[in-house]
Image (cartoon, grey):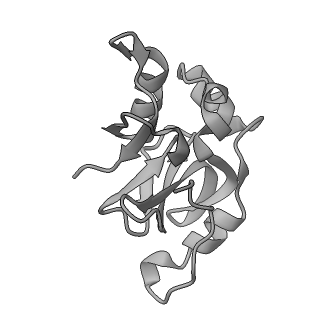
Amino acid sequence: MTRPKLQIRENQTRENRHRRPTVTRSGHIAGTPGQLYLYKRGIDIALVPDCGGLRWHPKCPWGDGATGCIIGRYSDTLTGEPRGIWRRPINGENPRALGPVGGCVVRLWPDDEVTTSLVIGEGVETVLAASLRITRRGTLLQPACAAELR
């Protein structure tokens, strides 16, 4: 199974009306304020394959307005089908999900890199920080996925 593409089918629910524009108007995170934000927090996203699949949206829908956000794709844990999105504004506010996230993860490493083990943790930034710094039995905690645990 490969990392799901950041595309999503239209559906009629009110909650999902912003998902498609949010995803399609975002671009790769490399070289953006989103990458710099993570780097200043001690997370060098360039060390993760394809920057963890994360993207940057300079005017992401947020409340009644818009703000610059790091975007991650939630996908079904078992099927890999794209579901919701994770949005991290770099203005200091807490991240929020948009769309369904139950039973989903943000795949930060491609599925083909999962050979003997997979780390799953709560929160994209927490998982990235741990996977780049913490070792167990002499190996970094990689590959990894982030989940929303409620």
Residue 59 lies, in percent from the top left, at 68, 57
Left or right placement of residue 88 versus residue 48 in this view = left
Left or right placement of residue 32 versus residue 18 in this view = right
The image quarter containing residue 75 is bottom left
The image quarter containing residue 76 is bottom left
Between 72 and 77, the residue placed more toward the observer is: 77
Residue 74 lies, in percent from the top left, at 46, 58
Residue 18 lies, in percent from the top left, at 56, 73
Q: Residue most toward the right?
A: 31
Q: Residue at x 39, y 9 (%)?
A: 138
Left or right placement of residue 19 versus residue 56 in this view = left
Q: Residue most toward the front?
A: 115
Left or right placement of residue 67 versus residue 88 in this view = right
Q: Residue most toward the top?
A: 138
All told, the count of numbered labels is 0
Give above or below for 48 relative to 80: above
Residue 127 visible in this rendered orientation of the protein: yes
Give above or below for 139 relative to 23: above
Q: Residue at x 49, y 63 (%)?
A: 63
Give above or below for 98 relative to 95: below
Residue 110 visible in this rendered orientation of the protein: no
Q: Residue at x 51, y 86 (%)?
A: 11
Between 65 and 121, the residue placed more toward the observer is: 121
Q: Residue at x 57, y 83 (%)?
A: 10
Residue 68 lies, in percent from the top left, at 64, 49
